[in-house]
Image (cartoon, helix red, strand yellow):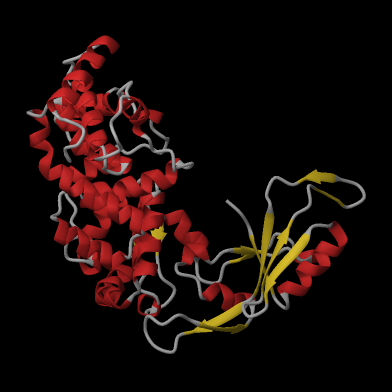
Amino acid sequence: LDFDLVVEGDAIELAKSISSQFGGRVTSHTRFGTAKWHLPEAISDGELCISTDNQFVDLVTARREFYQHPTALPTVERGSIKLDLHRRDFTINTLALRLDGPHYGELHDNWGGLQDIKQGLVRVLHSLSFVDDPTRMLRAARFEQRFDFIIGERTLELLSEARNLLDRISSDRIRHELDSILIEKRSANILARLAELHLLSTIHVDLKWDDWLCDRISSIRSDLPAPDWELTNYDSGLTLKRDLSYVIWLIRLSSIKAQGVISRLKLPVNLAGAILSACELWRNLPNLVESSPSDTVDQLEDLPPLSRYAVYLATSDEQLRLILIKYAKKWRKIHTNITGHDLKERGLPPSSAYRYIIKALRDAWLDERISTKEQELDLLAKLIETHPYDVNF
């Protein structure tokens, strides 16, 4: 999706020099030797004027890195392009093109990355690669399934030997890798491969995988659903796909087990709430079949929209799916014509009786016991007569 420019020397100074010649502005991080050149609307070299579609270009100082101990974050210092490429995760990610003078277009390929791409092989650069960074095991499966490659035999051996080191990786780093997996087109294939490699169970014992999950997560689309489902806080189908995948992945777990996975991954509070609500709704789904529309609304109304939509996608029971569709498209939109203001005008002092009366009226609309405003007014009169306003309901 973008190009990273690696500089042997000082990337920040180069970025400033480019910006002074072609415009735009530069932000930098001295500690890491990185710079972001925010592009102008167009770049001109005196002969050509090129419109810039991208918003910025990243420039990084070539560096080497070393690890104080296994799974630690790396310590970095300046280095050559060869050393910079050597800190990559797999050989297929070690290719670079020279951009300088007479060497323009020459390929840096010190570890056989081009040949591995041709052969469809995911291979680490050295035997301690997974020890240095165990999250590379998750990326190995992601690249393998995305490109329809295979993980090399020796790389598989090293992965198996280092697998338990995932226990020592922070929740944030594990979640970041899973987030990246769940937005992939072939996310279900990747998760199945992680399960086959015993990586999911290493992350948490209750991260299961089976054909049921494979079918459902494979069917999650990357576009946004109809507005009826109220998923208005999502402006990206990819982030919705990610969150739906988490919910459906854990939906069959008990609340206690789901909470264990949530804690291990440190999932965001809103997503955690949607997962736990979906788990509870999933267990109570059989009750919806025998419920009246008003009882169904009572059960569904306070749940996060993400929970309701995930359960709709997860269940294969057409009767239950129809109930959830009716709620989304019809029942949730039914409200009374009577408001608290109307009740006050009738002489009822504000109290909990307001809530009782308005709910009773709405339930009558939902259950089709009334269908006109006149019937609603008749029922209102009966409710007031039956339940005097000075009684606390």
Residue 364 placement: quadrant: top left
Query: Which residue is nearer to you in this view: 175 or 10?
Result: 175
Residue 171 placement: quadrant: bottom left
Q: Position of residue 131 (x, y in %)?
A: 35, 79
- Residue projecting furthest to the bottom: 68
Query: Which residue is nearer to you in this view: 339 or 318?
Result: 339
Residue placed at 17% from the left, 65% from the top?
A: 205
Residue placed at 24% from the left, 16% from the top?
A: 376
Residue placed at 29% from the left, 22% from the top?
A: 330
- Residue projecting furthest to the right: 46
Evaluate whether residue 252 shows in this view. yes
- Horizontal relation, residue 52 to residue 303: left or right: right
Query: Which residue is nearer to you in this view: 338 or 257?
Result: 338
Q: Position of residue 201 (x, y in %)?
A: 20, 65
- Horizontal relation, residue 90 to residue 204: left or right: right
Evaluate whether residue 372 shows in this view. no
The image shows residue 12, relative to residue 334, as above or below, that is below
The image shows residue 137, relative to residue 66, as above or below, that is above
Q: Which quadrant holds the C terminus? A: top left
- Horizontal relation, residue 272 to residue 105: left or right: left
Q: Position of residue 24 (x, y in %)?
A: 79, 57
Residue 69 placement: quadrant: bottom left
Q: Position of residue 28 (x, y in %)?
A: 69, 71
